[in-house]
C-alpha cells in the first residue's frame, strides 16, 4: 500500500508464520506474554525486530507485571533477533477521568519498573494526552483524537480544536 512508516503490531505475534510475515514486512512487535519471547528466540538468523515490551501497570488487559516484566526485559536484551534498546510502554485504564487517582498510580508504577532502563517510552493515549501532560513520553498513541473525537465526557472534539481525519458518506438504500 506504499506505507513507509513503521507499523507496530500491538498484539505482537503468536505463531512462527506470523513472525516470518512480520520479518518480511519489517513490522515492529509488541511483547506482552512470555510465549512471545520464545517465538523471538526462533527468529530467522540475521533478522532483527524493533520490540515494544508492555508493562501492565493496572489496565489488567495485556502486559507483564513486576518480576515477570523485569525477566522479560532481561531476556529480550540478550536476544540477537531484538534490536536494542527495547522500547517500553503501558496503557492507561482511566485517563479520561482526571480526578481518578489510578492514572497517577499507573504512572508511578511505570517509572519505578522502567527506571534505569534505556529505550523510548510510550504511555499516553488520547485521554492522557489531554488530561495528563506528565504522561507524554517519547511516543504517544492517539486513538479517538485522530478521528476528531474527544475521549473526555462532556467535551467535543471541537472544544480542543480537533478535526476529523476522515469522513464517511453513505446513502440509505431502504427503509422498513
Image: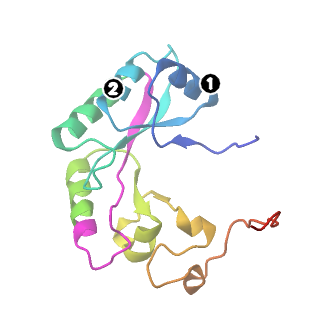
- The colour scheme of the drawn protein is rainbow
Mark 1 neighbour density, 10 Å: few (under 14) some (14–19) many (20 or more): few
Quarter of the image for the C terminus: give it.
bottom right
Query: Where on the picture, by quarter, is residue 32?
Result: top left
Q: Which mark is residue 24?
A: 1
Relative placement, left or right, of 9 versus 92 is: right
Residue receiving disc 2: 35
Relative placement, left or right, of 10 versus 173 is: left
Return the x and y of residue 90 as percentages of the image width and height.
35, 52
Q: Of helix, strand and loop, which one carries label 2?
A: helix
Q: Which residues are magenta?
A: 80-104
Q: Which mark is residue 84?
A: none
Relative placement, left or right, of 157 versus 14 is: right
Figure check: 171 above or below 160: above
Q: Nearer the viewer, residue 136 or 118?
A: 136
Figure check: 63 above or below 170: above
Depth check, mark 1 against mark 2: the one in front is 2
Q: Of helix, strand and loop, which one carries label 1?
A: helix
Return the x and y of residue 52 as percentages of the image width and height.
41, 41
Mark 2 neighbour density, 10 Å: few (under 14) some (14–19) many (20 or more): few
Q: Nearer the viewer, residue 66 or 61?
A: 61
Contact, CB < 8 Å: mark 1 with mark 2? no
Q: Nearer the viewer, residue 121 or 164?
A: 164
Amino acid at each position: 500500500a506504499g506505507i513507509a512508516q513503521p507499523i507496530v503490531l500491538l498484539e505482537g505475534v503468536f505463531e512462527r508464520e506470523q513472525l516470518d510475515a512480520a520479518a518480511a514486512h519489517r513490522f515492529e512487535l509488541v511483547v506482552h506474554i512470555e510465549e512471545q519471547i520464545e517465538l523471538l528466540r526462533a527468529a530467522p538468523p540475521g533478522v532483527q525486530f524493533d520490540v515494544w515490551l508492555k508493562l501492565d501497570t493496572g489496565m489488567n488487559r495485556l502486559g507483564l507485571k513486576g518480576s515477570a516484566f523485569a525477566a522479560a526485559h532481561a531476556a529480550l536484551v540478550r536476544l540477537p533477533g531484538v534490536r536494542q534498546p527495547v522500547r517500553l510502554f503501558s496503557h492507561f485504564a482511566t485517563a479520561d477521568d482526571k480526578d481518578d487517582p489510578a492514572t497517577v498510580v499507573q504512572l508511578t508504577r511505570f517509572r519505578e519498573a522502567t527506571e534505569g532502563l534505556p529505550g523510548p517510552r510510550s504511555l499516553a493515549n488520547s485521554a492522557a494526552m489531554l488530561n495528563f501532560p506528565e504522561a507524554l513520553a517519547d511516543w504517544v498513541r492517539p486513538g479517538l483524537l485522530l478521528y476528531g473525537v474527544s475521549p473526555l465526557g462532556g467535551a467535543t472534539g471541537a472544544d480542543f480544536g480537533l478535526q476529523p481525519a476522515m469522513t464517511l458518506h453513505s446513502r440509505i438504500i431502504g427503509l422498513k
